[in-house]
Image (cartoon, helix red, strand yellow):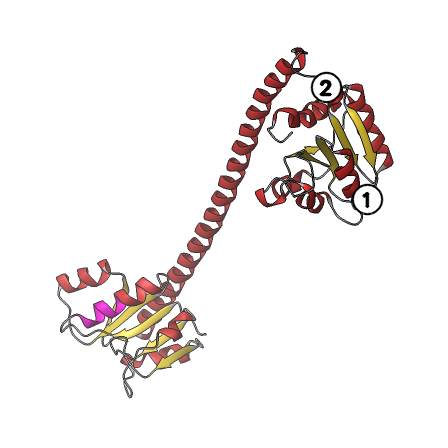
């Protein structure tokens, strides 16, 4: 698509604009109808030329209305009018206020016409660049908005966690209401080191712990052992942790339980905690041994979650 579109009735030469553009080696598209013609091809404009050149008809200001329609659909397109009549100040003011880039009064010089059209092309491309930057800014703002919402959600989750931990501490200290060694936990992990680590930490906290290295093999164990809390890896052979949660959480034949997934991938937390997964909590694997107490506390949240 050329940068310039000449829109004129058949046989019209627009004051010789076509010859001027040819002399400058500038490509253009010639449409044998004026912009006021109801058949004026909108699809051509979808390819977005920089400048439309057409004749101005003062009459009922159809040219102004046609230009407004072009600008509404294609705000970067610049319109240059050609006329053989001296226009009043009121008409010129109206034209420029409504978005015309320029008016060429016949007869005009080749140099003047070419300079005006070059400036119109430059203005159009500036506007396109501004629109692109504006789009990038909107996308950046949207990205920032999503990040802020995520931080706010994580902050709310942290506040809820702190509140729950206080309640958990209260129950743990009130021994007549709560016997932690009666709480059964099933640990499912194909990683022996991690499985042993979680077993050690939970057993040390007083839980009764069983384990398995198979997600598929854990199904009959869950039915028979009836754990209060299930702790599993995300990635496992057979079924992953989310698939297992969907199979056993709240399903007939399985005990009420609190399902926790431990993962090293923080990027997957939103997916893991989405409502359709049935997962109650997701914990990032502690990189510091001193933070294992936090992992145990998060797992123990199942005791007061209402699921067990």
Q: Nearer the viewer, residue 21 or 180?
A: 180
Q: Quadrant of the N terminus?
A: bottom left
**According to the image, label 1 marks what residue?**
217
Query: Is any atom of residue 228 visible in this view?
Result: yes
Does 213 sit left or right of 80 as displayed? Answer: right
User: What stretch of residues is rendered in magenta?
Assistant: 61-67
Does 266 sit left or right of 28 as displayed? Answer: right
Q: Nearer the viewer, residue 42 or 21?
A: 42
Q: Residues within 10 Å of mark 2 (few under 14, many from 20)?
A: some
Does the magenta portion include 118? no
Q: Nearer the viewer, residue 255 or 294?
A: 255
Q: Residue at x 67, y 38 (%)?
A: 266
Instruction: Provide residue 124's location: percent of width, then percent of height.
Output: 39, 62
Instruction: Provide residue 93's location: percent of width, then percent of height.
Output: 18, 60
Residue lying farthest bottom?
A: 11
Does 83 sit left or right of 112 as displayed? Answer: left
Q: Residue at x 60, y 41 (%)?
A: 270
Q: Secondary structure at mark 2?
A: helix
* Circle number at residue 180: 2
Residue lying farthest right?
A: 192
For marks 2 and 1 on the same chain, the one whose residue lies earlier in the sequence: 2
Q: Residue at x 32, y 71 (%)?
A: 113
Q: Residue at x 33, y 75 (%)?
A: 110
Q: Residues within 10 Å of mark 1 (few under 14, many from 20)?
A: few
- How many labels, in total? 2
- Residue 272 falls in which quadrant of the image? top right
Q: Nearer the viewer, residue 211 or 64?
A: 211
Q: Secondary structure at mark 1?
A: loop
Does 61 sit left or right of 197 as displayed? Answer: left
Query: Is any atom of residue 194 visible in this view?
Result: no
């Amino acid at each position: 698509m050329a940068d310039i579109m000449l829109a004129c009735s058949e046989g019209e030469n627009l004051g010789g604009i076509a010859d001027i553009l040819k002399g400058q080696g500038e490509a253009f598209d010639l449409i044998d109808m004026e912009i006021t013609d109801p058949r004026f091809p909108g699809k051509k404009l979808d390819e977005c030329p920089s400048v439309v050149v057409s004749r101005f008809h003062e009459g009922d200001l159809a040219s102004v209305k046609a230009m407004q329609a072009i600008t509404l659909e294609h705000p970067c397109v610049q319109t240059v009018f050609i006329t053989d009549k001296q226009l009043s100040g009121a008409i010129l003011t109206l034209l420029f206020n409504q978005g015309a880039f320029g008016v060429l009064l016949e007869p005009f010089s080749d140099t003047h016409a070419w300079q005006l059209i070059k400036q119109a092309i430059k203005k159009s491309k500036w506007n396109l660049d501004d629109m692109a930057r504006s789009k990038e800014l909107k996308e950046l703002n949207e990205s920032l908005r999503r990040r802020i919402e995520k931080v706010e959600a994580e902050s709310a989750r942290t506040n809820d966690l702190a509140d729950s931990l206080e309640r958990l501490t209260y129950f743990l200290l009130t021994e007549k209401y709560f016997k932690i060694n009666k709480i059964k936990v099933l640990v499912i992990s194909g990683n022996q080191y991690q499985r042993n680590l979680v077993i050690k930490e939970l057993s040390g906290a007083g839980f009764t712990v069983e384990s398995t290295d198979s997600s598929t093999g854990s199904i009959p164990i869950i039915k028979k052992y009836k754990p209060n809390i299930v702790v599993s890896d995300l990635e496992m052979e057979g079924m992953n942790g989310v698939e297992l949660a969907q199979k056993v959480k709240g399903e007939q034949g399985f005990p009420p339980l609190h399902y926790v997934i431990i993962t090293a991938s923080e990027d997957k937390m939103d997916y893991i905690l989405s409502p359709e997964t049935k997962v109650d909590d997701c914990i990032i694997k502690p990189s510091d041994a001193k933070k294992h107490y936090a992992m145990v506390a998060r797992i123990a949240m199942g005791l007061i979650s209402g699921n067990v």
